[in-house]
Amino acid sequence: LLNKGQLHDGDYRHRYVLREGVGVIPVGFKSFRLWVDDSLLMLTRNGPEGPEFRILCLPADDEEGVFDYSWSASITDQWSIVKTDLKKRGKVGPHWGINAMDLFGLSHPLVQKEFNNPFDASINKADAGFRRLRCEDGIESTINEYADYLGYQQEADSSYRWIAEEFKLAPLEEGWTSEITADKEVLFVKNGQKTAKHPKFSQFYKLFQSAKKEQIRTKDSKFMNASAGESLLTQLLDFIISSHIGTESPLITPQTLKSMAEIIGIHAKHEFGLLPIAKKALRHYYVRAMEGRPAAAIAEFKKEVDRERKVFQEQLNQYEDVNVDGLDFIKVQCIECGR
């Protein structure tokens, strides 16, 4: 860390937040990272409508010169470009699957501690810097307020207004309620704990980002379902990768297996015979994420689940009418090795 920067307190303050909204993006932040034998430098500054990011790559070989990437409003897009160049030069480092915010330390607890809860002391500290859902009329947030909450640029993103409409209509999950503060901001409450983060923010934020990438300009149910699955998969991979760094944590645990089973449509408790597919999917996505290679679509694993489910059901049907009374033993077959 070369410079922790300072908190932005001007226009578009709600956009100076980390991905999915938890934590702040300071202005003037500067950090340095060794990458294989190169050096990477990351900077932040104020942009016209939010923060901007810049990465510089200083190769170990001075003859290559400095790879200077221009300022960008998206650190994800810029890091993707940098990674493409690094890969072409054979510089695939050990932290290939980590996102740029974590890689350069912006999301590190010691950095965020410097800006802990700068807005409202009554809110849970985990919400420091989280963008707020506004409610100017004090009764109900408008579609435009939901759009702003997701980070829309009203003119450039007008084609994706349908996502903000869906977000507004989405009911809160059981146990959640909302309240409006004197500052016309919405808080969400569960078990007496308050948070500025809508329980479904991550889902619709991912949907918004995916829709822009795929240019889905009208409501598409199949796309929405697929995006929800991709969002869950991203969260699972972030959890697995972060827990593996510097540790020997196992990849497959009851928690990760159950999560992957849910993503590809397996009922872990009642369809245990299909869990080997979830294991295979876990290994596939983890390896591809760490190597920075394209991964199979979730739909491919869902198709495999459907095929195996039919086979499994056919096998069960064969034994529906079998009378086991008087048998000395019942054969049990291992679903892993087949013995």
Image: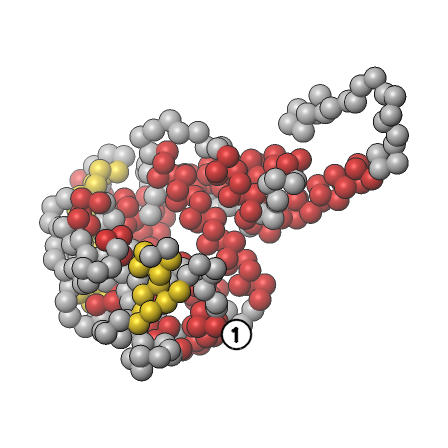
Q: Which one is in front, 328 or 200?
A: 328
Q: Which one is in front, 95 or 143?
A: 143
Identified at 42% across, 48% down, the residue is 235
> Horizontal and vertical percent for residue 262?
55, 47
Identified at 44% across, 69% down, the residue is 167
**The N terminus lies in which quarter of the figure?**
top left
**The C terminus lies in which quarter of the figure?**
top right
Give the answer, above or below, for where 47 lies relative to 299: below
Q: Which one is in front, 219 or 85?
A: 219
Q: Which residue lies furthest to the front in this view?
A: 192
Label 1 Cα crowd, 10 Å radius (few <14 / some 14-19 / many 20+): few
- Residue under label 1: 218
| Count of all numbered marks drawn on residues in the image | 1
Give the answer, above or below, for where 195 lies relative to 58: below
> Horizontal and vertical percent for residue 222?
59, 63
Q: Which residue lies furthest to the bottom in this view?
A: 137
Give the answer, above or below, for where 40 lies relative to 167: above
> Horizontal and vertical percent for residue 202?
40, 58
Report the amino acid beneath label 1.
Answer: Thr
| Residue 269 horizontal side relative to residue 253, left or right | right
Q: Identify the image's colour scheme: rainbow, by chain, secondary structure or one colour.
A: secondary structure
| Residue 273 horizontal side relative to residue 41, left or right | right
Q: Quadrant of residue 33?
A: top left
Q: Residue furthest top?
A: 328
Q: Residue 92: in sight, yes or no?
A: no
Q: Which one is in front, 327 or 251?
A: 327
